[in-house]
Structures are given as structure tokens and as C-alpha cells.
Image (tube, rainbow, N blue to C red):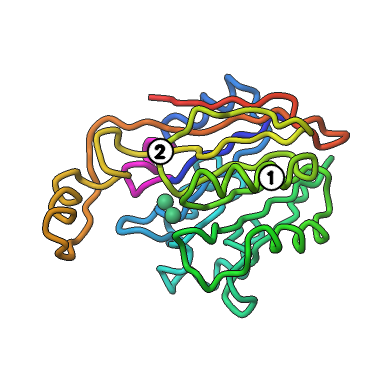
Amino acid sequence: MRIMCIGDVVGSVGCRFLRDRLPSVKRFNGVDLVICNGENSADGNGMTAVSAHYLFDSGVDAITLGNHAFRRQEVYGMLDENPFIVRPANFPDRVPGKGIINLDMGRRIVTIINLMGNMGMDDGLENAFDCADRLLEQAESKIILLDFHAETTSEKRALGYYLDGRVSAVFGTHTHVQTSDAQVLPNGTGYITDLGMTGTIHSVLGVKTDIIINRFRTKLPARFELADGACRLEAALFEIDDKNGKCLNAESMRIE
Ligand SMILES: [Fe+2]
Ligand SMILES: [Fe+2]
């Protein structure tokens, strides 16, 4: 099956662009399943029920999250109840939502896991490598996709090789900058260090450039405003062998 994984969709601007482009991209590439990182889908970061439904209505099958997963309290109930939303698994068990979902797609089940890195992120989180080992015991399928929401390229590549042959694909999110290393690892795991972002091209991670420049120069807090202008959708496409869950091909996508 062909699985498309989409990098952090930023704000209403990114959501609208996704809705505009996704239907034709799915058709043209014969995509069977779309996974999308929604942690920045609401304006002002985080995800709301409105932005989540917007992603689903645009053709997204499952949403992964990240460090902004719990920014909007209004979405906590949805994190618990919606079977198509997964949040980083290495948060304490008592927080809303689940870190692994087993999606029943009729003829097959697909397992989706979301993890956060430990480097340069919240230092109270469970070790991502140990957490992955623990979660793999709960996987109900050989087709396992893992969104690793992390800051450093080294931690992401290390987890990719650690899980090589045990999951179908590991794709990184969080930096909003796509890397050029889409590949199949030696034991059959598809991999990319970061999917990139879906949002405004001329921006700093989706935000107006002058706001971020000012922040670096003054260190003063500032309200982030979405940049506008031309957008790009960044993603990766993994072709997975249904029978054994191995990745046959991995490639990055950039659509303007
Ligand atoms: Fe993000
Ligand atoms: Fe993030």
C-alpha cells in the first residue's frame, strides 16, 4: 500500500492549501492512507476540534501531534475519543489521548505510533527508544508507521536505525524543514529525518519573518502571526509491502 505522510500543517493558511492540493495528489499517486501532523493546524499553534475536522474533511485519515498537542484544552476530549488521532506516547499515561492507534482499514490493520524526542524537548518524557520497544508489543499489524517529533537529526536517524526491520516507516516532524534523506534502511524500514511543513514558503516555520527576527534580536515575547503568500505542501510517500510490512520505496514530495 502507498502511504503519504504530511509534515506539520501550519494554521488556516496551511490547512486551506492542503485542502486545495490533497485530492489530486492522492489520486495522481494512488495513495491508500494519509497521515498528517496537526500540532500547528490551529491559528496560534496547537490543534482545535475545528482544525482537526478540517484536516479529516480534506482527506487526511489519521492525525499525529507533537509538543503542541496539549496547547488547547478544548481538544482534550477529542484526543481521548477520536480513534484517528495519536499524540506523543512518551507523555505520562494520565494525560489525554493515546500514543498508539491500530486503524482498521477493512482488509488490513495499520498501526500508527507518535513519539517525541528527548534532545532539546521536554526533559521529563520517557526515553523514546524504550517507549518504542514498549509500544511495539501493542501493535496489531505488521504495517507500522511512526512519527518521531524531535529536534535533532542525530536522535531521529538513531531511532530510525534502532527500529530498522521492526517498523514499516519512521518519519520525523517538528523542524518544519524537509530533509533530503528519504530512503529505505538496510532491513526494510522507510525513513526520512523530517517531512517538512505545509504552509507559507517565505516564513520562519510558518510565522511572519519580521516577528521572529525581532524576537531573536530583542528576546522580547511577541504574538506569532501566520505569514501569508505562496504555500508548499511537504510530505513523503512510502510504498509498503502489505504482507510483511517492509518498505519497498521511500520518496519525499514537495508540492506548490
Ligand atoms: Fe510543528
Ligand atoms: Fe513541534
Q: Label 1 is placed on what type of residue?
A: Leu
**Cα–Cα gap, marks 1 and 2:** 20 Å
Magenta-colored stretch includes residue 16: yes
Label 2, secondary structure: give it.
loop
Furthest residue in direction bottom, as rendered: 94
Who's the residue at 57% across and 66% down the image?
79
Within 10 Å of disc 1 (Cα), the crowding (few <14, some 14-19, many 20+) is many
Q: Which mark is residue 145?
A: 1
Judged by depth in the image, the label closer to the viewer, 1 or 2, is: 2
Camera-nearest residue between 173 and 224: 173
Magenta-colored stretch includes residue 214: no
Asked where in the image residue 217 lies, by quadrant, the reply is bottom left
Who's the residue at 57% across and 76% down the image?
95
**Part of the protein shown in magenta:** 9-18
Camera-nearest residue between 170 and 129: 129
Q: Is residue 214 left or right of residue 135?
A: left
Classify the position of ligand 2 by quadrant: top left, top right, bottom left or bottom right: bottom left
Who's the residue at 66% across and 60% down the image?
83
Q: Vertically, is 73 above or below 161? A: below
Within 10 Å of disc 2 (Cα), the crowding (few <14, some 14-19, many 20+) is some
Where does residue 91 sit, x and y in percent of width and height?
A: 58, 70
Asked where in the image residue 190 lies, by quadrant, the reply is top right
Q: Dominant secondary structure of the magenta stretch?
A: helix
CB within 8 Å, label 1 to label 2:
no
Q: Which mark is residue 177?
A: 2
